[in-house]
Every structure is written in structure tokens, then in C-alpha cells.
Amino acid sequence: MKELKSYLNANKERYLNELLELLRIPSVSADPRFAGDVRRMAEATAEHLKAAGADTVEIHDTPGHPIVYGEKMVDPKAPTVLVYGHYDVQPADPLELWDSPPFEPVVKKTKLHPDGAIFARGSCDDKGQFFMHVKAFEAMVKHKALTCNVKFMIEGEEEVGSKNLEKFCLANQKKLSCDVVLISDTSIIDNNTPSLTVGLRGLCYMEVEVQGPNKDLHSGVYGGAVANPINVLCSMIASLHDAKRRVTVAGFYDEVEKVSAKERKLMNAAPYDEKQYMKDLGVNDLMGEKGFTTVERTGIRPTLDVNGIWGGYIGEGAKTVLPAKAFAKISMRLVPGQDPKKIEKLFQKHFEALAPKSVKVKVNAHHGGYPVVVPTNSVEYKASEKAMEATFGKKALPQRGGGSIPIVAMFDQVLKAKSVLMGFGLDSDDIHSPNEHYGLFNYYKGIETIPYFYKYYAEMKKKK
Ligand code: BES
Ligand code: MN
Ligand code: MN
């Protein structure tokens, strides 16, 4: 382990430059104009896996973006770790809100990252994080310190719902067979407070259309007599929360699993400065479900948010129009117990029933995903705990993540393997936002920690 650490220290600059090179590739999966760059990113990922020491490296085409697979089998008796990550990124717009271009990475110091942070789209989510695994793998191979068989599966469609990954897993169950899935695509509490993610929220993403009259109308001639679909949509949306900020969709909370008082107490004991939290976000107050704290609201409670709303005239100046249609994208974060398929039906029924007779509504579903809970008494969790402790010098706190990684529940079902969510980002790293960044401390800490996971996992599996 000492040798690995000196190897890391001696190669820090190269490790950084290699990541910067990858961050220059705009692998935006949502926008077809970037399809060529997405492929280039898959090829670059494959090249890095080869160079790091993988024996087999393959690029698997899908109807969407390619999946990169690589493996190194060291010993049939050793446990097998499947590393999952994603090389695709979110769109970078609005570009004008970036302090430096999203695909021209720069390193700058920040308050939370006094050693510097890499500013670029995908730096934290997830290029910087999956690449830590490639670099840790390189170091272990070089030092013949690989205690587990390793398989890499790095996909290019996570940010658009992993549409083709399930099929790939179903068709390649044997190739992907493993003892554990290792993922770095989540956060720690802060750089002095290591944590491991023990839960992810699920997702149910809907799109609604409200149709009023059969054409746009003069708002003076018709306004007041004919339902304005934007006015109607706004009241429908407003009614989706009650005065306690609970979601009003009938049956929404029916299957929410109760979280024990003990777990709630533990999560509330983690460091959190509400004043600073508000200050960082530029808000004077917070808003959320009554009776729950901020960590609870983002970790263990289901929520509903409008992600976008449009319709009518949004051009220059004023146009007096009563529009024919209004639209919104509405997503719900789900917690253990809730089933996205059922919530989809509940939402549809509820939303349709909300509409007055003066309009017609259409409700459609986008991608969804099941919530995840990670047991903390498993060998893999204990190994990740030990690994974090080895490099941070502190015990990692179990923490529920507010975001979603829908394929984690699928790994459980299709590959019959549990996941370890050992991410190294910070919630304040602005993933999906302008000025996304990833701390150099976090990048190097990840590369240092990953080999400990392999070491402890192999040791603990042997004993079992
Ligand atoms: N890495 C994130 C998820 C995440 C971030 C989990 C921080 C926990 C903490 C992932 O890339 C992501 O953005 N997922 C999407 C869902 C997907 C279906 C688009 C999300 O959570 O919105
Ligand atoms: Mn991610
Ligand atoms: Mn993401």
C-alpha cells in the first residue's frame, strides 16, 4: 500500500492531465449533435483501460451510445469486482453562466477546495470519479497488487436514463457475473467527514400537456370566457402540494417505508450548517415538508418538482395571446417502498382528475427508476468502511443520497449483486449546474482509497 501511495504521488500530474484530456471531449448524451463526441469518449475510455492493464477491452454498440467493457481476471478463486460508471455528461447550457468554457477544464481554488478543483462539465459527474477507478487499477496492476478480478462497465447513457444497459446486462449475465458492484458517482459529506451512500432515491418523471381552445386566441376578445391552459396548468401544479408541503397525489405516501428514529437521529447528527447552506444557494429561507429536517427532506422523503414549464408567447416584447396549449415536465423523487410504475399510474389518475372540463390533458411518462437501500452489515459495506477509514483516518458515516442511479436496483435484480456506493464528490460541486467542479483532494483521495477496498474485500471474503 505504501508503494501504491508513492506511485500515486509520483504520477499525480499525469493522472490530472489524463483526466483533463477526457474532460475536453463534450460527451453530452442527451443531444444527438454530440453523438460523435460521445463515441470518441467511449474510445478514449477503452484506450485508457487497455493502457492501465485490462486484458480484454470491448466497445459494445447499442441502439444508443456505446458501453465500454474491460476486464482483468487474476485468480478464479478471488472475488470479482464490477466497476460501474458513466462517461456521458449532462448538457452544459446555459453556457453564459459558466465562468470558463465547460469543455476547457481549468484548475482553481475554492473555499471548500483550497488545494484546487477542476472546473468542467463531467469533472465530478462522472468522468473524474470513474477515472479514479482506472488509475487505481493501473497502480494495482503495475505493483501486482490486484487482489480481486476486475470488470469495468462504463456506459454512455446514464444521464438519459440508461435505456440500453438493462438489455446489455440481461444478454451478458455470465460475462458480467461478479460478487459486488463498485460505483463512485455520489458524494461524501465534506472533505473532513467521509461518508458512504446507503440509499438513493428512485425517480418517476412525467410530462403533461394541457389543451385549451383549438388555436391561439386574442386574449382581449376571448380572455375571461375561455379557459387559459397556462392559468389552468399553474393551478393544477399549485395544488400538487398542500400547506404542509406534502405531495397531494392520492396514495403517494401509502407505501413509503418508515425510517427508524435511530436512523433519523444518526443522519441528523452529521455536520450541517443551515445558515451556510442558505447563503451558498442565495436563499433567505428553505421550503420543504413540515416535520422533517433538510437531510431528511433530501434523503428519506419523497418529493415532487416541476423541472420545466412552457407555453404561450415568450418572445420579445408583449403579445396579447390566450394560448392553445401549456406544458410541464414534473418529476418525483421516490424513497424505499415506493414503486415508480405505481406512482406513475397514481400521478396520471390524479392529474387527469384535477383538470376542469374546459381543458383536455395528456399525461406521459419518461424514464423512471427504483429507489435503493444498501445494507450496512454486509462484507462489501464493511470493506468500503475500512477502506475509507484507512485513508481519511475517520470512520465513514452512512448517508442517504438524494439523487438517483436507476440501474443500481437493476444490478440487484439482473446480476444478483449488491452495490457499494463509494463516491468522493461534494453535494456543492455543482453537478448538472454551470461551473461543475471536482476537488483535486477528492480525485486523489479516491485513487488512494479504491485499492484498500480491493484489499479488504478480498481478505474479508476469504475469511467468510
Ligand atoms: N451521479 C448522479 C446521481 C447522484 C448525484 C446521486 C449525487 C447521489 C448524489 C447521476 O449521474 C444522476 O444525475 N442521476 C439522475 C437520474 C438519471 C435518470 C438522469 C438524477 O439523479 O437526476
Ligand atoms: Mn452520475
Ligand atoms: Mn448526473
Image: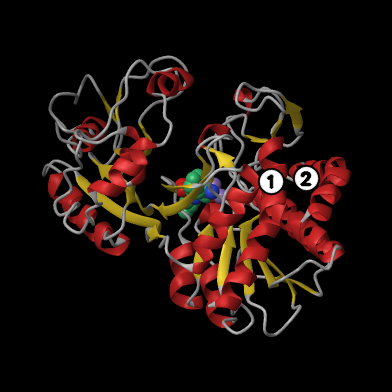
Q: Residue at x 84, y 48 (%)?
A: 6
Residue 438 placement: quadrant: top right
Label 1 residue SS: helix
Of residues 26 and 121, the one nearer the viewer is 121
Residue 289 placement: quadrant: top left
Q: Residue 128 — which label? A: 1
Colour scheme of this structure image?
Answer: secondary structure
Q: In the image, what residue type sits under mark 2?
A: Leu
Q: Where is residue 102 drawn, in percent x and y?
A: 69, 33
* Residue 18 sits above or below residue 148 on the image: above
Residue 313 lies left or right of residue 386; in this view the side is: left
Of residues 147 and 185, the one nearer the viewer is 147
Q: Where is residue 142 drawn, in percent x and y?
A: 86, 63
- Name the quarter where the N terminus is drawn: bottom right
* Residue 206 sits above or below residue 442 on the image: below
- Label 1 crowd bin: few (<14), some (14–19), many (20+), radius 10 Å: many
Label 2 residue SS: helix
Q: Are marks 1 and 2 in contact (CB under 8 Å)?
A: yes
Residue that numbered label 2 is attached to: 19
Q: Where is residue 240 drawn, in percent x and y?
A: 20, 39
Q: In the image, what residue type sits under mark 1?
A: Gly
